[in-house]
Image: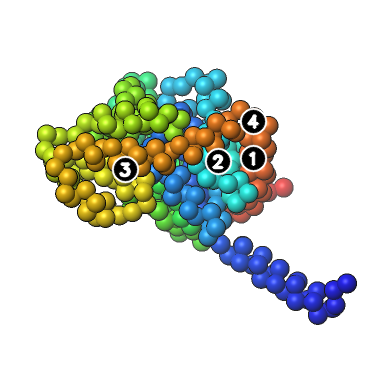
Amino acid sequence: MLSFHEISFWKTKEKRLLNMESAKKVILTGMQPTGKLHLGGLLGATNNWQKMLDDYDCLFFLADQHAITMPYVPAELRKNTLDCVAQYIACGLDPERCKIFLQSHVIGHAELMWILGCITPIGQLERMTQFKDKSSKVGESVCSGLLYYPVLMMADILLYNAHLVPIGEDQKQHLEITRDIAQKFNNAYSETFVLPEPYIGETGARIMSLQNPAAKMSKSDKNQNAVVHITDSDDVIRKKIIGAVTDSDSKISFDQKNKPGIANLLNIYAAATDQSIEKSIAQFADLTNYAPFKRAVADAVIAKISPIRNKYLTIANDREYLLSVLRAGKEEAQKRANKMMAKIYRKVGFLID
Ligand code: TYM
């Protein structure tokens, strides 16, 4: 039986721990479940996210509403979404230490998007690089959802008052507009939103195609030799990396302009081995041809990916487990979203019954 003093000691300790928990900053980020996770998403995204689990209050979601802004097949989206949950977990996003949920499961993302859209100038959305790139691909049939894409992204972030948003380079502009509009809302309706900071890793923030180092590595690349997927076998990974387009020189140096293929492989190597670019260059400074370097990059990528692939293969078909992870994530996310939306509705003047 515990004495009164012991009970009050443990209660104080528990309270302190709970306060520490609630004082943790919120990290939120997401990914579109449009296909298999590739090396860019792994090194530029999930690899950084899983390092944050202990120090932050982490919310990770799958942006399925964003995924319908480009042509897609509904049955594939449904399948890819659950598959991505398995890939998140396999990459180290332990559901015991973070929340994983679907954007479309939580009421609030689309509602907040509408409100933020009402203070976002169209011109600012039309100037977004990603909108210009993607709309040029679909031409005349470009949908308004694509234009609104960054507004939905703002809502994703601001709905949970995220302090830090880990992203790759390509999403930086979307973070900047999020901060702009959050500030605009705060000025118009009083202090409401935290201004979120982007978190861009030192290495891996922009992994390029292995076949065309001028273009970002992308799931939708028609040339599959350009993309390493986390489900690729060791042999396939090795073949793709050894076959990466480089240049006719033979010295390893980081020169983005003249040696973009080698710069990309150095970036991949540094991110996969968790060391700086400088240290990576020093390691290969004496080489007189690219072959041993490419072999070392392939080894590093295989060492990174193979445990992830094995974990993925053990959970990918456990539909009940994956759905239970999403249910727990949704429950927590919805609780937070409800609280925030009640506050926002009041501020913008909606009548609350
Ligand atoms: P998405 O699905 O295109 O990419 C997910 C994350 O992976 C990063 N990434 C890369 N990083 C390095 N090299 C690459 N080749 C590479 N390709 C992708 C992306 O920068 C991103 O961080 N709009 C977002 C999803 C989203 C989101 C959000 C993110 C929706 N709402 C709110 C953060 C916060 C997207 O389409 O990511």
Residue matched to label 2: 89
Quadrant of the image occupied by residue 23: bottom right
Amino acid type assigned to the residue bearing label 1 in the image:
Val
Q: CA distance from mark 2 to mark 3?
A: 22 Å
> In the image, which disc is placed on residue 318?
4
Residue visible at 85% across and 74% down?
2
Q: Nearer the viewer, residue 121 or 349?
A: 121
Q: Is label 1 or label 4 in front?
A: 4
Residue matched to label 3: 268
Q: CA distance from mark 1 to mark 4?
A: 11 Å
Residue matched to label 1: 325
Callout 3: helix, strand or loop?
helix
Return the x and y of residue 232 as percentages of the image width and height: 42, 29
Q: Is label 3 or label 1 in front?
A: 3
Regarding residue 13, the answer to whether it shows in the image is yes
Residue visible at 58% across and 33% down?
314
Q: Are marks 2 and 3 in contact (CB under 8 Å)?
A: no
